[in-house]
Amino acid sequence: MLQAYIFLAYTITVVAADYTDSSADLDSCISSSPETYNLPLHVASVFILLVASGFGVVLPVVMGSVSSGNAFFHKAFFVLKYFGTGIIISLAFCHLLQDSFETFSNECIGEMAYEPTAPAIAMGSMLLIWLVDYFGARWAARRKSPDVVPDGSAKIDTQTPLESSPNSDTKPIFQDLCCETGCRPLQDLDPASQRAHWDVQLLEGGIVFHSIMIGVALGAQSDGFSVTFAALVFHQLFEGLGLGARIGALVWVGKKGASVTKWVMCGAYTIITPVGIAIGIGAHESFNENGRAELLAIGTLNSISAGILLYSALCQLLYAEWVVGDMRNTSNARVASALTALGLGIFAMSLIGKWT
């Protein structure tokens, strides 16, 4: 279904773009000459980014594995987890969304018939993921709950009078609007649950879409390669820390060898950008980073990734963990350390956005 959505979004961007040839003669839209392409440095970037990505995503997973038996690692992992949250928030706003705006504003595409194409695709991506998440949650809840009648509504006990009590679901309509738990005891999200694993897989999906495109663009880039490459080393390192912290927080139980999945997820993130660079190197003679088709493809995938990460960052990381999750009733010291780590993550990734 996601592949079909990508195809639909790309088709919309092609239709939305005004097909005029006025930009075809612009010198800035012509691909760089092969003489400016530094092949040895591009090949070296494959291995350097492989190491940076792998170190970033594996470190939090290893720390999460040993944190339960070591107080220092437990505290370090806690800080790293919320540092990663800040990274993901900044990645969605200051990298993906900004890049998609700039791409669709590129003069080499031409004038867009529908100017807010980038936010429209991001909005559609976010709504699609929300619908998948919503109906998936409904399906999972119906499988677990026996108190469901054939039409899908919950059974009502007619013998018990409806009274307002601290633990009752019947409360004033304007009471506690932002919190679904109301006055009931707070229940943390089980890190071993299928829902928790789905949330992290969704987060990785948005990151992977972004990573493959920046890899292809870097592999084909000629002018300004060194600055972009240096910034992307830190970009991949911090992004890996953010994703790895979420993978490391999961509990892997059930079938024998189920924990192998976490290493598969780490491996997917580790290799995806180097693979993209290798593709860009192989296609650099025919790949025009300012070509109309290339810009439309990159802008579309960046917008889709932005929508996915915006949903994950705001709903699953901020709201679910802070407003209704375990951070709501934790100590002030833990809140202060988590907020500090969150702010540092946002600052670090936003700063890198100046050069990427």
Image (cartoon, grey):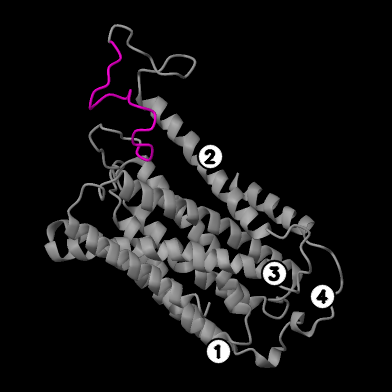
Q: Which residues are magenta?
A: 161-179
Give the position of the N terminus as an image quadrant.
Answer: top right
Q: Residue 120: where, in percent of width, then height?
A: 64, 53
**Marks 4 & 2, CB-CB < 8 Å contact:** no
Under circle 2, the secondary element is helix
The residue that label 2 is drawn on is 131
Q: What amino acid type is highlighted by mark number 4?
A: Ser
Ranked by sequence position, the earlier of labels 2 and 3 is: 3
Q: Report the residue that reaches farthest toward the right.
A: 21
Q: Are marks 2 and 3 in contact (CB under 8 Å)?
A: no
For residue 277, which numbered disc appears in the image?
none
The residue labelled by disc 1 is 40
**Residue 157, quarter of picture:** top left
Q: CA distance from mark 4 to mark 1?
A: 33 Å
Q: CA distance from mark 4 to mark 3?
A: 12 Å
Q: Amino acid at mark 3?
A: Ser
Judging depth in this view, the residue of 83 and 298 nearest the camera is 83
Name above or below for residue 285 compared with residue 249. Answer: below
Residue at x-position 41% and y-position 57%: 265
Q: Secondary structure at mark 4?
A: loop
- Percent of width and height locating residue 94: 50, 68
At 59% from the left edge and 62% from the top edge, which residue is drawn?
Answer: 302
Q: CA distance from mark 4 to mark 2?
A: 39 Å
